[in-house]
Image (cartoon, helix red, strand yellow):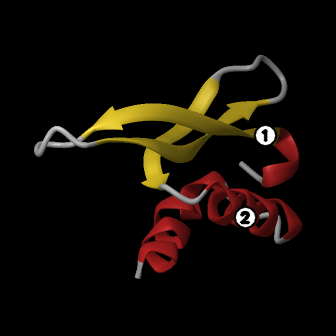
Amino acid sequence: MSEKSIKLMLNEREVTNEDGCSYTGYGFTAYRKSDDAEVFRIDDLSVERGEVENLITMIVDNDVSVTHFEEVIEDFCS
């Protein structure tokens, strides 16, 4: 499924880690445009909103397939 057939939305979520510290985590959800079905979701990818927004832009600009999102995220995190 190509990026042109999906839309990406930024996620924002309040997270509390095992030490009891709270923070805002950002991720994204991919929806199929034809029926708005969720096809991929990742939460708490980064605490930096701008980094996730840039990742979303890169995915859209390069027409990355949903099947490659996990690889892209792995590269993003390394």
Name which residue lies at 55% across and 71% down: 72
Amino acid type of the residue that numbered disc 2 sits on in the rendered structure: Val
* Residue at figure coordinates x 78%, y 17% from the top left: 35
Q: Secondary structure at mark 2?
A: loop
- Return the x and y of residue 62 as percentages of the image width and height: 82, 71
Label 1 crowd (10 A; few <14 / some 14-19 / many >=20):
many
Q: Which residue is mark 2?
A: 64
Residue 7, given in percent of the width and then of the height, sits at: 80, 39
Seen as rendered, the residue at the extreme front is 21
Give x and y (percent) for residue 5: 84, 41
Left or right, residue 64 beside residue 41: right
At label 1, the amino acid type is: Ile
Up-down: is 8 above or below 70? above
Compared to 33, does 62 lie above or below? below
Q: Position of residue 45 (x, y in %)?
A: 46, 55
Quarter location, residue 32: top right
Tell me which label, 2 or 1, sits earlier in the chain: 1
Give the side of residue 51 with respect to residue 57, left or right.
left
Circle 2: is it few (<14), some (14-19), or many (20+) Cα within 10 Å?
some
* Residue drawn at the location 12% of the way across and 42% of the way down: 18
Quarter of the rendering containing residue 77: bottom left
Position of the C terminus by quadrant: bottom left
> How many marks on residues?
2
Q: Which mark is residue 6?
A: 1
* Residue at the outermost top position: 35
At a point 79% along the width and 52% down the height, the residue shown is: 3
